[in-house]
Image (cartoon, rainbow, N blue to C red):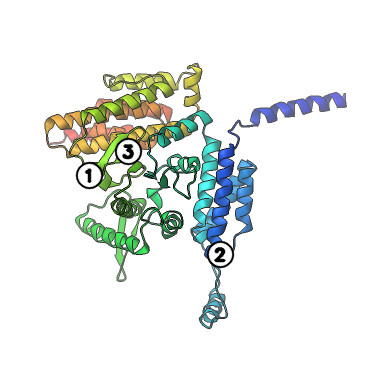
């Protein structure tokens, strides 16, 4: 009887383990090769800086290559803390070190995680995380859609995690810029990142120097102080003056500096074509941006307007993507009510078609594809705001509404998208439509429920004389 009980217990345990065993993408040969190449690169960069390569870093690479997800996640969290926080040295010991260093009896060894060696490590880790968190067909689709529209020898700025790291991992050789050069606009204000880019690309493209970086910071500071004095600081941007010095903080400030450095790269490489996957808005790019498949081409000269052909190509591309992913093109004739009806029916339907069901279960894919379409809506909204002719304003507003509707259908749980969509509708006093979006979004993601109060406040302001 005891043996029978043990047998039943073993069978139950096996069933539980099988049920708990999360299905995930095995490491492909290409991803394995990429991770190994980044390990070699990171070690070489650390050695060039005279930094000791930590054993913990090799453990991380080993965990990734062995596909031990929990171990890799925990190790990376540990290393990230080391990267963010320099070890505290007692004042007495630091005093001794400083004096020994002055007389040449002590040479400090740099922390490898404080050098450019950190960059290939995070590229390997986040490429692996993308592989683990996405359903493979959608990840492969995302990578293919971007890589397929960028010509060889171009420069590509990747903004989101998959838009940067998954594309980096897909290169024939990231270090050689083949088939194109992959950078991220989000890290250009980091001196170690610029040093990393220089170690790979300086023989092929112009990479900003520390002088360029310092000039960008000074330019930003002057402009930020003017905005602070006028009370017009941008979102997530702060400037503090005290003790004879000025400090800036906030992601808005960092991205403004990143934007200035990205402009240096664009201007100093006039023979290259440039492409952008937008994360945080780079204001100077807006007059230059042309929708190009899932991303943007940064046109060499500013464009007074987007041609009908450009808009038709964009509509055709995204209508096709919507059909592939959610089974509905949500054409320009679709009302906001019909978009909301579609979202409620589709995302609340447990018996949706198998193809659509896979997408409905892939939250990272929803976040990514909705973000891409949201970025296009943002550019159309900017052009609508900048247009001086009524017909052009309406033309851009129509494209903006279509892009927002499709983005919402692709990812109704995307809080940033929902907030911007509702903000745009409130701006043009379509409060009923804004409320419809907020209600549906609140059912998909309860965090969005508070938006209804904001809409009511905006409606009351609009009614005030």
Q: Is residue 430 visible from the viewing direction of this image?
A: no
The residue beneath circle 3 is 296
Of mark 3 and mark 2, the one earlier in the sequence is 2
Query: Left or right: where does residue 372 sit relative to residue 48?
Result: left
Quarter of the rendering occupied by the N terminus: top right
Depicted 135 relative to depicted 49: above or below: above
Residue 394 is situated, as x and y percent measured from the top left of the image, at 17, 29
Pick the front one: 404 or 308: 308
Disc 3 secondary structure class? strand
- Cα distance between the residues tagged 3 and 2: 39 Å
Disc 1 secondary structure class? loop
Residue 310 is situated, as x and y percent measured from the top left of the image, at 25, 31
The residue beneath circle 1 is 301
Q: Which residue is located at x 42 percent, y 28 percent? A: 444
Query: Left or right: where does residue 339 sit relative to residue 135?
Result: left
Q: Is residue 45 visible from the viewing direction of this image?
A: yes
């Amino acid at each position: 009887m005891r043996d029978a009980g043990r047998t039943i217990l073993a069978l139950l345990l096996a069933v539980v383990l099988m049920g708990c065993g999360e299905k995930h993408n095995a490491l492909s040969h290409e991803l394995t090769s990429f991770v190994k190449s980044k390990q070699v690169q990171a070690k070489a960069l650390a050695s060039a800086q005279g930094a000791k390569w930590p054993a913990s870093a090799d453990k991380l690479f080993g965990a990734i290559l062995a596909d031990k997800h929990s171990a890799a996640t925990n190790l990376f969290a540990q290393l990230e803390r080391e990267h963010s926080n320099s070890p505290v040295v007692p004042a007495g010991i630091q005093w001794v070190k400083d004096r020994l260093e002055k007389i040449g009896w002590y040479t400090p060894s740099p922390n490898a995680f404080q050098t450019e060696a950190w960059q290939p490590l995070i590229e390997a880790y986040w490429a692996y995380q993308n592989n683990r968190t996405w359903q493979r067909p959608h990840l492969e689709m995302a990578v293919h859609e971007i890589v397929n529209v960028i010509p060889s020898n171009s420069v590509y700025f990747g903004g989101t995690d998959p838009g940067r790291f998954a594309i980096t991992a897909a290169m024939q050789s990231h270090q050689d810029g083949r088939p194109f050069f992959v950078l991220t606009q989000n890290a250009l204000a980091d001196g170690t990142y610029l040093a990393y880019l220089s170690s790979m690309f300086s023989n092929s493209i112009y990479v900003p120097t520390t002088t360029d970086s310092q000039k960008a910071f000074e330019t930003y500071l002057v402009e930020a102080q003017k905005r602070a004095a006028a009370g017009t600081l941008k979102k997530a941007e702060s400037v503090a003056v005290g003790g004879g010095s000025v400090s800036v903080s906030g992601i808005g400030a960092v991205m403004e500096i990143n934007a200035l450095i990205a402009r240096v790269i664009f201007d100093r490489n006039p023979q290259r074509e440039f492409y952008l996957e937008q994360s945080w808005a780079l204001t100077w790019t807006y007059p230059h941006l042309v929708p190009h498949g899932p991303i943007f081409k940064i046109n060499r000269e500013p464009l007074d307007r987007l041609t009908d052909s450009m808009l038709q190509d964009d509509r055709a591309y995204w209508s096709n993507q919507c059909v592939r992913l959610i089974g509905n093109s949500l054409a320009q004739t679709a009302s906001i009510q019909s978009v909301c009806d579609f979202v409620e029916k589709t995302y609340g339907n447990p018996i949706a078609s198998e193809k659509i069901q896979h997408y409905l279960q892939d939250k990272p894919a929803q976040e990514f594809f909705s973000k891409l379409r949201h970025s296009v809506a943002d550019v159309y909204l900017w052009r609508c705001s900048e247009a001086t002719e009524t017909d052009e304003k309406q033309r851009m507003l129509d494209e903006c509404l279509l892009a927002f509707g499709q983005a919402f259908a692709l990812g109704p749980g995307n809080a940033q998208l929902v907030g911007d969509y509702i903000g745009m509708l409130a701006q043009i006093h379509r409060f009923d439509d804004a409320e419809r979006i907020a209600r549906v979004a609140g059912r998909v993601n309860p965090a969005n429920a508070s938006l209804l109060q904001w809409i009511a406040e905006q409606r009351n302001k609009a009614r005030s004389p």
